[in-house]
Image: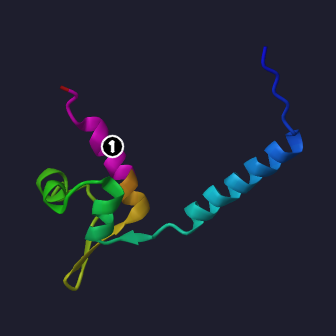
Amino acid sequence: MISIQLDEQQVEQRFIEELRKRLNDIEHRHTFWDMKELCRQTCMSETFIRETFFYDPRFPKYRVGKKWLFPAKECEQFLVMWLKEQPTN
């Protein structure tokens, strides 16, 4: 038989540290993504993005000069909705 003893105070302290790290990550997220960041966030190539959802009128995108910018929160919401619409062959 194996017996495990945990120091509840240490476990709680570790939990709080991890929670602070996660909240800090959320606070420092980007407001806007450029195409490179969109590709990184979605793990998709620029070609795939352009061929699948870039031209969807619901996809939030803004052209500023020669650069495309994408509002991060709006993109995340769109991407989840878009993914749920895809066929599950």
What amino acid is labelled 1 in the image?
Met
Residue at image location 74% in from the left, 47% down from the top: 15
Q: Percent from the top left, x then y, of residue 44?
A: 24, 54
| 47 lies left or right of 3 | left
Location of residue 82 by image quarter: top left
Q: Percent from the top left, x then y, of residue 52?
A: 15, 50
Residue at image location 88% in from the left, 45% down from the top: 9
User: Which part of the image, by quadrant, shows the C terminus?
Assistant: top left
Membership of 40 in magenta stretch: no
Closer to the camera, 80 or 11? 11
Closer to the camera, 3 or 35? 3
Q: In the displayed structure, would residue 65 be above or below residue 23?
A: below
User: Which part of the image, by quadrant, shows the N terminus?
Assistant: top right
For the stretch drawn in magenta, the main secondary structure is helix
Closer to the camera, 13 or 32? 13
First to last magenta residue range: 77-88
Membership of 84 in magenta stretch: yes
Residue at image location 32% in from the left, 61% down from the top: 40
Q: Percent from the top left, x then y, of residue 41?
A: 36, 58
Residue at image location 84% in from the left, 35% down from the top: 6
Location of residue 43 by image quarter: bottom left
Residue marked by disc 1: 81
